[in-house]
Amino acid sequence: MAVDDKVLSWLLDSDPALRWQVERDLAGAPEAVWQATRARIATEGMGARLLALQDDDGQWAGGAYFPARPDPRAVYHADDEAGQPYTATTWTLNTLREWGLDAGALTGTAAKLAANSRWEYDDLPYWGGEVDCCINAFTLANGAWLGADVSGLADWFVDHQLDDGGWNCEWVEGSRRSSFHSTLNSLVGILWYERATGAVEALTAARHRAQEYLLQRHLLRSLTTGDQVGPWVANLAYPFRWPYTALRALDYLRDAAAFDATPPDPRAADAVALVRAARPDDGRWLQGTRYRGQVWFEIDVPVGEPSPWVTFVATRVLAWWDAAGAAQADNPTADASPV
């Protein structure tokens, strides 16, 4: 998919956390250019703001997953105090990691968290994780990024995969059916770990099995009824946070295909069509929702406005998908294509 020049210019006029990815993935800039922009995350804009909010003990807001204290610098989406607070350590690390901050900007943080941070669940040590697979997935990825030993968590995902192929954060309450949300969060965390440490046979097999769980459902539907599993599937929103969306699932598949050196799976076609159909005429996707809860500051635009982040991710996904289709047209004897 060709990127409109006006849209590309609009995307490039952004915070370093987004701009470097646009340069690399859409603009075709030389590595020296996007790496220089990426280095600015630690010293400019939103990345620098989040780094400045870190406590001396390595945490944010004094807590592992939930803030331990009120902080007058935090704000609420639309003054709504309900919902998940996103100011604590895990959520802030997730954001900085996803933006591409060099782990060197957080030198010493892994050791500080090992010494000072405990999970709200049973006061468990931070890098050991707890029982929630979404929290453990975030910790697996953040630990791999910061150089902590989270190999025990990698084994945990193999041991706790459900019979239908995915994961469910409610397993500890007795659930034996996988969740779209839990499965995608687990997949993203596992892929981060594999990229940082190298593929591990049992873990890679678990990841591929979980991908199959989602692909059997075409990323959208119940396997038993064929109905869309929920309205949240069609949300086009940034930041992604924990909920499942078709766009986030497609971006994961794009990333996994690059890591595994595989083509797109045709069963993702309906999800691609959903994302494509949501594109306005000017090529800039709109912010679809904001997840309720406390944040340090707003990262993206309000609901209904053109979102640089959603536009970037959606454009990158369609470019990946369409390029695979074009390659198949040029080489009809290649593996099955998405078109």
Image (spheres, rainbow, N blue to C red):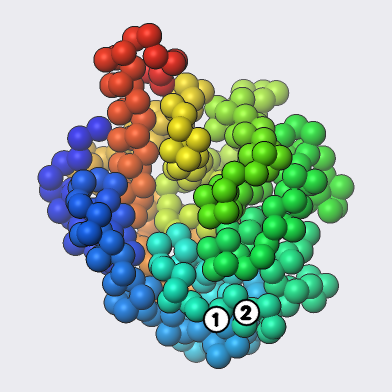
Binning the other alpha carbons within 10 Å of mark 1 as few (below 14), some (14 to 19) or many (20 upward) gives: some
**Residue behind mark 1:** 108
Indicate the position of residue 42 as horizontal and vertical percent values: 36, 75
Query: In the rendered view of the protein, which quadrant contains the N terminus?
Result: top left
Residue shown at 69%/69% (left/top)?
Answer: 127
In the rendered structure, are the residues bearing label 2 and label 1 in contact, judged by CB atoms less than 8 Å apart?
Answer: yes
- Mark-to-mark CA distance, 2 and 1: 5 Å
Say which element carries label 2: helix
Indicate the position of residue 109 as horizontal and vertical percent values: 56, 79
Would residue 209 appear left or right of 104 to someone viewing this image?
right
Indicate the position of residue 301 as horizontal and vertical percent values: 33, 62
Whether residue 56 can be seen here: yes
- Using the rendered view, name the quadrant where residue 126 is placed: bottom right
The three-letter code of the residue at mark 2 reads Ala
Whether residue 228 can be seen here: no
Say which element carries label 1: loop
